[in-house]
Amino acid sequence: MPWPSNGEIDIMEYYRVKGVATILANAAWADEGLYNAKWDEAKFPFPEFLKKDPEWPSKSHLWRMEWTDESIKLFLDDELLNEIDLVRTVNPEGSNPFQQPHYIFLNLAIGSNGRDPSGALFPKEDVVDYARVYQKK
């Protein structure tokens, strides 16, 4: 199934939104038309995190997802950022991409969304202590 019909869950995503550094917690699925997506997105301006704790960028943080048959909940340091109602995430042909297996993809997405990375200072790093998956029985 091509994107976005296969579903996309962004547990942690970072972009500049209208020039402001922003953390996002999103899910996407198909809308009418090839490669058109419906989004359930939540955007949090990064300066809000710095107001709470100026040392926030230098600390480790825990991103968490709770995925059930009814919803996907995305958390940052135990704060709920977004709750996606899986009753609404139905593709135009009737399938629900969040009722099928997915894979975990960790990356820096350099140059994504058409941005030119040639002006960036390299090397860059994405430090991940661990990624764990638990399943309720």
Image (spheres, rainbow, N blue to C red):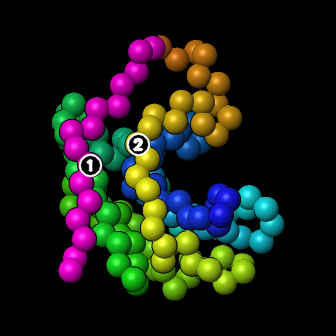
Q: Is residue 83 visible?
A: no
Q: Position of residue 48 (x, y in %)?
A: 34, 47
Is 7 inside the magenta-drawn segment? no
Q: Quadrant of the N terminus?
A: bottom right
> In the rendered structure, are the residues bearing label 1 and label 2 in contact, judged by CB atoms less than 8 Å apart?
yes
Name the residue carrying label 2.
Answer: 106
Q: Which residues are magenta?
A: 122-137
Rendered image quadrant of residue 5: bottom right
In the foreground, 118 or 97: 97
Q: Nearer the viewer, residue 95 or 108?
A: 95
Q: Secondary structure at mark 1?
A: loop
Q: Nearer the viewer, residue 58 or 95?
A: 95
| Callout 1 crowding tier (Cα within 10 Å): few <14, some 14–19, many ≥20 | few
Q: Where does residue 84 sit, x and y in percent of width and height?
A: 45, 73
Which amino acid type is shown beneath numbered disc 1?
Ala
- Identified at 21% across, 39% down, the residue is 129
